Amino acid sequence: MSQRVKIKQVLHDDAVQYTATVKGWVRTFRSNRFIALNDGSTNNNLQVVVDFENTDPAILKRITTGAAISATGTIVASQGSGQKVELQATSIEILGDSDPEKYPLQPKKHSLEFLREIAHLRFRTNTFGAVFRVRHTLAYAVHKFFNDKGFVYLHTPIITASDAEGAGEMFRVTTFDPQKPPVTEEGKVDWKEDFFGRATNLTVSGQLEGETGAMAFGEIYTFGPTFRAENSNTARHLAEFWMIEPEMAFYNLEDNMNLAEEFIKYVIRYALEHNREDLEFLGARLAEEEKSKPQAERSEMGLIEKLEFVLNNDFMRITYTEAIDILKNSKPNKNKKFQYMVEEWGTDLQSEHERYLVEKHFKKPVILTDYPAAIKSFYMKQNEDGKTVRAMDILFPGIGEIVGGSQREENLDKLVHKMEELGLPVEEMYWYLDTRRFGSAEHSGFGLGFERLVLFVTGMTNIRDVIPFPRTPKNAEF
């Protein structure tokens, strides 16, 4: 038997009159003769033509939607419309049966809500085939970008005793029996008896550990899962998601912004170059979805156009203070159309405000800098005005914040003072503060939620549709 050839290669080569073996899953089988076969390498199916008069009827009965088969035969120019080549089968082997009465993916349109309920099978649809091939390409591009720049890929811990963001919304990690954990004389849980001898949780960020790496290697990045026990059932939140977090010694805030903009443009360009077919399919799907929206809510640009727009425009850079002035004087604010009104400096911007700046005011991606210290994390470099910190957020159309970063506070005394002010455990964080005690230097970094990037690039509207197995409140299936 000939060695298996991927369907993408068969369709791409356009060569004919050669023997090939293809393997995949049946999408449709009509007239007892034409199989639409897909192996996941592309959204396009290969037509396999069966010689039904010379094929065992028992085999024909088993060629059903969802069945896995192997087909060997000759690749020939197709007589029908819709494909250039097809396979004239000389032999068909059933690799795995699929009961058509029970198989949930029938040859018809299924809602995204229904497909989320069968997430383990949704990869076999065109939409999710395209989404997850694009996700793969973006992940590869992330590693390629940093590797080519000489960054060191650092694996930071999944289990940690620190709360990098001070958010407090963490998943506890323990080996205790929840019904009867050991307690101290005061009646509190005795964490000294637990596996790690202290309270631990799933990480919310690899940043703090990443900073220790940057102070040795110069430039590092992390790319791994992070966890937030935030009881938020929205189209933008997940309890488990992937974060990309570079940390760079000797970088100030402007260096940080330049790298982030270059990085985002690189990975989007890489996806456009390597997954054009998938992105065009997703663009057509999005255009169809947009038709059901009121005219005022429709996007002004198609998916490919939007991605190319990001590549071809410099990101607008403004301060938080400038942004507040724009928002205060905006029509939605004056007409009380914002859900959260912008009334004074110090307001924490909401997604609706971020999207107004990007989509209505500047009509391009925006980098906001110099936020009030009170609404940002303890580790951010304090500005000389005593009120703001050297933070930067990158805002994208349809998404809002996609990147959050800052220049880090390298001054030990200022950092300790800020931690004490916020009631953070200075002694427990000795290892982090050692980066300021021994050879401290100006340094910066940022975090990018990978799923938000995939959401933007694919044009999907629910973050649960761009991660293979979404983890959300009351949902940990599969």
Image (cartoon, rainbow, N blue to C red):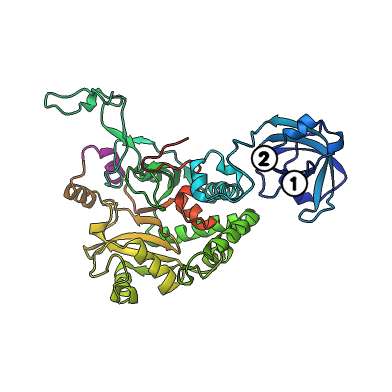
What residue sits right under mark 2 in the picture? 65
- Count of picture labels: 2
Q: Are marks 1 and 2 in contact (CB under 8 Å)?
A: no
Snapshot quadrant of residue 272: bottom right
Magenta stretch bounds: 426-438
Amino acid type at image mark 1? Leu
Tell which of 259 and 348 is nearer to you: 348
**59 above or below 177?**
below
What residue sits right under mark 1 in the picture? 46
Amino acid type at image mark 2? Thr
Q: Residues within 10 Å of mark 1 (few under 14, many from 20)?
A: many
Residue 286 image offset from top left, x and y in percent: 55, 60
Q: Which residue is drawn at the image coordinates 46% and 48% (left, top)?
A: 464
Residue 85 image offset from top left, x and y in percent: 81, 50
Check residue 389 for magenta coloring. Answer: no
Q: Quadrant of the N terminus?
A: top right
Left or right of residue 53: residue 228: left
Residue 261 image offset from top left, x and y in percent: 47, 61
Q: Which residue is drawn at the image coordinates 81% and 53% (left, top)?
A: 80
Whichever of callouts 1 and 2 sits on the residue coming sooner in the sequence is 1
Nearest-to-viewer mark from 1 and 2: 2
Q: Which mark is residue 371?
A: none
Q: Secondary structure at mark 2?
A: loop
Q: Residues within 10 Å of mark 2 (few under 14, many from 20)?
A: many
